Image (spheres, grey):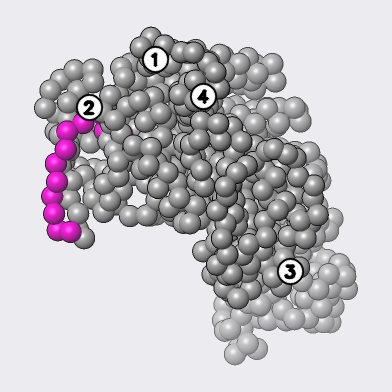
Amino acid sequence: MGNSARKGRVVQQAPAARAGAQPGQRTSVPPLEATVDATQKAFQIYGNGKNVEAAINNKDWKLVVQTLIDENNVMIFSDTTCKFCAKVKDLFKSMDVPYFVLELDQIEHGNQLKNALFELTMQPSLPAVFARKHYVGGFDQTQKAYREGAFLKLLEGNRQTVQPSYDYDLIVIGGGSGGLAASKEAAKLGKNVLVLDFVVPTPLGTRWGLGGTCVNVGCIPKKLMHQTALLGQAIKDAPTFGWQLDNKTIKHSWSSLTEAVQNYIGSLNWGYRVSLRENNVTYENAYGEFIGPHKIKTTNNKGIQKIYTAERFLIATGERPRYLNIPGDKEYCITSDDLFSLPYCPEKTLVVGASYVALECAGFLAGLGLDVTVMVRSILLRGFDQDMANKIGEHMEEHGIKFIRKYVPIKIEQIEEGAPRLLKVTAYSAEYSKIIEGEYNTVLLAIGRDACTRSIGLQKVGVKINEKTGKIPVNDEEQTNVPYIYAIGDVLEGKPELTPVAIQAGRLLVRRLYGGADTKCDYINVPTTVFTPLEYGACGYSEEKAIERFGDDNIEVYHSYFWPLEWTVPSRDNNKCYAKVICNIADKERVIGFHVLGPNAGEITQGFAAAMKCGMTKEQLDSTVGIHPVCAEIFTTLSVTKRSGGDILQSGC
């Protein structure tokens, strides 16, 4: 027995799991002696020693297994090499439920015990979880029982020792679209929910109300200002349709625009507050920070602190604009967080960045008649289809927006105070080894966004983040590596940063946790739109990603320019609008990428996104009768492939 005993080891987890022990109670356990069979010694400590010893001597492995099951409130049969065994142990740690685990690969007679366990459960795989003598199942079944409350009900006879008392069932950190959707859904399912939302002011002091980025400083004000610019273009087109306008009396008021936009946003902020109250969701305008397992500290704008506990937490803190970390950036630059409530017209503006935020803001500011320059370090719209991105850039340049390429600012200085100021921007190009200077009234930074995860105490509870980006890795159920903490929205690693995605993920997550549902959020073929002057709608693969994924020979790209009827009378922008679909040849030319540049691109893309989820093919597109005369009908007549090099220019609608 000596040699086999030396290689045997019992991994002891939470000895307090023995019947009658209290949570957190430590039992003094003598070290295993190398000269004693590890299995036998383990059962002398944790089980009925005499019964187990006799069972071992008689090689009655069923009795050995049954004794462990009978004498421990929660018993886990595990294997140290099994990832699902590790997950189930993490789950119990997160619940603060004491348990005893026996690692069958680490003890003498492990295989015999595993065979006996199979005869008992008829399940060949590990882990095998038992609670109060009842077989729960493996990891998936245990997790499901926990989510539905069945597991804790099973332990109800010892409820005071296994189910801690929490202030809330769910605490949502972040009052954006995703967090609000999840909180209301949970409350509808009878859960006690707290929402924490706190806006850290920008360096210029800008802050806003409940609703997150989309409502306050993102989608909503951006689309309204984009519409403002479109109306300006409509006014220019109007005389060709017979409208007699006096151009001398037509001018735009920045203050009137921002007042109207902020009034509408204010009504939404109030509506969210009312909606939370009507759904019995508790709301606190306070900053949340984890201070320990299941415990969070909140601090409001008066510095008053409170501590709350919850069974589960949902991180929905979103992102904030990134700064350059150069002299003068925080003192003199603005971001999209400041732009939509700026108390003065920006006048001559430098937009720094090539993101969709940069190009959208540059587009509508130019549409208001302002002098706009975009400074970009590299390519436009990284992550989007580059064919489409370049066409957007060309269109913006043709309409008066200037681009400075391959440069980045290295210093911002104030020349004159005022509203707006006069600023000097010094920029450097590593490619050209050259420094340039320029003067602007406003410098808008749109170089990317950072996840709001680094100062909410995640390290204190062990939640892993991507150290470079701050993003949180999750599994396919939005669960972090800490089982009682979940995350949705822009903080997720590798997921689309879109409001509807956060809303969908939040609602589905809550329905799985509390409603017995099993539907997961589908992050594939998510449609999106960039609201540049020439709108860009997309769904599925970019051309570059399709080639990378399937190979150039296995995809076919059908494309064409088109001319919206509305633009023919003013005779503008012919052969600027563009449509293309990317098809997988090997899969009956299934459409795997959909792209459109033109008016109302978002409205066009939304319907085709539904068709793509249903597996739309090129043949089905061709057999669809188009609506005439609308822009979307171009997708029913695409016949020229990129591979052919055929002519795609259009002379009429």
Which residue shows up at 46% across the image and 13% down it?
A: 245
- The residue identified by callout 4 is 240
Q: CA distance from mark 4 to mark 2?
A: 35 Å
- The residue identified by callout 2 is 441
Discs 3/1, front: 1
Q: Nearer the viewer, residue 642 or 590?
A: 642
Q: What amino acid type is highlighted by mark number 4?
A: Thr
Can residue 277 be seen from the camera position used here? yes
User: In terms of sequence position, does the residue under pointer 4 or pointer 3 come before the other?
Assistant: 4
Asked whether the residues under the numbered discs 4 and 3 touch, taking CB atoms below 8 Å apart as contact, a structural biologist would say no
- Give the class, few, some or many, for how many residues have Cα within 10 Å of label 2's Cα (few <14, many ≥20): many
- Give the class, few, some or many, for how many residues have Cα within 10 Å of label 1's Cα (few <14, many ≥20): few
Which residue shows up at 51% across the image and 31% down it?
A: 570
Discs 4/3, front: 4
Q: CA distance from mark 2 to mark 3?
A: 54 Å
Asked whether the residues under the numbered discs 4 and 1 touch, taking CB atoms below 8 Å apart as contact, a structural biologist would say no
Q: What amino acid type is highlighted by mark number 2?
A: Asn
Q: What amino acid type is highlighted by mark number 3?
A: Asp
- Magenta span: 432-447
Discs 2/1, front: 1
Discs 4/1, front: 4
Q: Nearer the viewer, residue 468 or 651?
A: 651
- Give the class, few, some or many, for how many residues have Cα within 10 Å of label 3's Cα (few <14, many ≥20): few
- The residue identified by callout 3 is 587
Question: Which quadrant holds residue 38?
Answer: bottom right
- The residue identified by callout 1 is 247
User: In terms of sequence position, does the residue under pointer 4 or pointer 1 come before the other?
Assistant: 4
